[in-house]
Image (cartoon, rainbow, N blue to C red):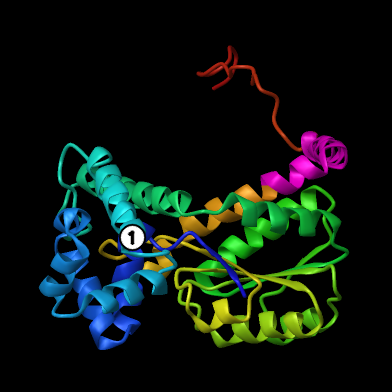
Amino acid sequence: MSDVTGESGGLLGRLRIEGQQMPEALARIAETILADPETAAHASIVDLAERSGTSTATVTRFSRTLGFKGYANLRVAIATETGRAEQARWETDISGDIAPGDPLTDVLGVVTAADTRAIQGTAAGLDVTAVERVAEAIAGAKRVEIFGLGSSGTAAREMAFRLERIRVPVWFRTDSHTALTNAALTLPGDVAIGLSHSGRTREVIETLAEAADHGALTVAVTSFSRSPLAEVADVVFTTAVQETTFRLAALSALHSQLLILDLIYVAVAQRTFERTADALELTVRAVDAHRLPEKIPSRKRGRAKGQS
């Protein structure tokens, strides 16, 4: 069974995404909670069942579907999240809407708020135990494969670059056929990481499944914990997203993906401290001659004497 961490945008974000895929009765409970989370946080199981037009047994089943032991635990989670959201609320109510004529100062506020909320949502649900498991595996792996396309490919490329700098044997390929053949070369003890916001990108799913067939530890980074990609992974990290005008969910997921990958990278570096420190020192020294000195002598402006 997969380890699932970091539901998209916390519990409420998870309900917005997964509620649409639930059976009708469970979906009604999700809609009722999302319509008024603060009321739901204080409602009894009977109250919630009546407001959603279901039964107490269905509410209990709904709670367990989300991974809670019972409704009491679910209600605590709702209360915790609504309280945290209220505390983190911006002084001005910034929506994700950006009009063509909006001044850039307003756009900056919208983008900053959206990215901050997405990162906070991802961090709030991230299971550090799962991060430690992946980091331990990468630190000892003879082969690490990372694959992603589009915006997810940007995050995958950055992770590969970082691991290369600390002497981790890592491969990142943008071509799906090459990625598949690389995945076929993995062995037990190796690690394969697939990134896809939707979790439905066929090439990423096939690559991760290929690595799984050969015994590698498979890791998925996606916004949907019940996606096809998540189903073929041993460990699943889910990202929170906050859409704004011109930046759809797939584009907005990049910062959350980088947060997860950055934490894994640092955890790997901690476990290979001496090797990492030596590698970073060597790589910095290798390119040092290509950097300008910190203090550049000021140039005298104007014409020198005798020049016409």
The residue segment tinted magenta is: 266-288
Who is closer to the viewer here, 191 or 181?
A: 191
Seen from this angle, which residue lies furthest top? Answer: 305
Residue 231 covered by magenta stretch? no
- What secondary structure do most residues of the magenta stretch adopt? helix
> Viewed as shown, does residue 163 lie left or right of 30?
right
Mark 1, other Cα within 10 Å: few <14 / some 14–19 / many ≥20: many
As displayed, is residue 145 above or below residue 270?
A: below
As displayed, is residue 52 above or below residue 138?
A: below
Residue 275 covered by magenta stretch? yes
Residue 92 placement (x, y as % from top left): 15, 40
| Image quarter in which the C terminus is found | top right
Who is closer to the viewer here, 4 or 238?
A: 4
Amino acid under disc 1: Leu
Residue depicted at x 85% and y 51% = 167
Residue 152 placement (x, y as % from top left): 54, 68
Residue depicted at x 79% and y 44% = 271
Q: Determine if residue 267 is in view.
A: yes
Residue depicted at x 19% and y 58% = 37
Which residue does the numbered mark 1 point to in the structure image?
74
> Viewed as shown, does residue 225 lie left or right of 188?
left
Residue 57 placement (x, y as % from top left): 28, 77
> Viewed as shown, does residue 162 lie left or right of 46?
right
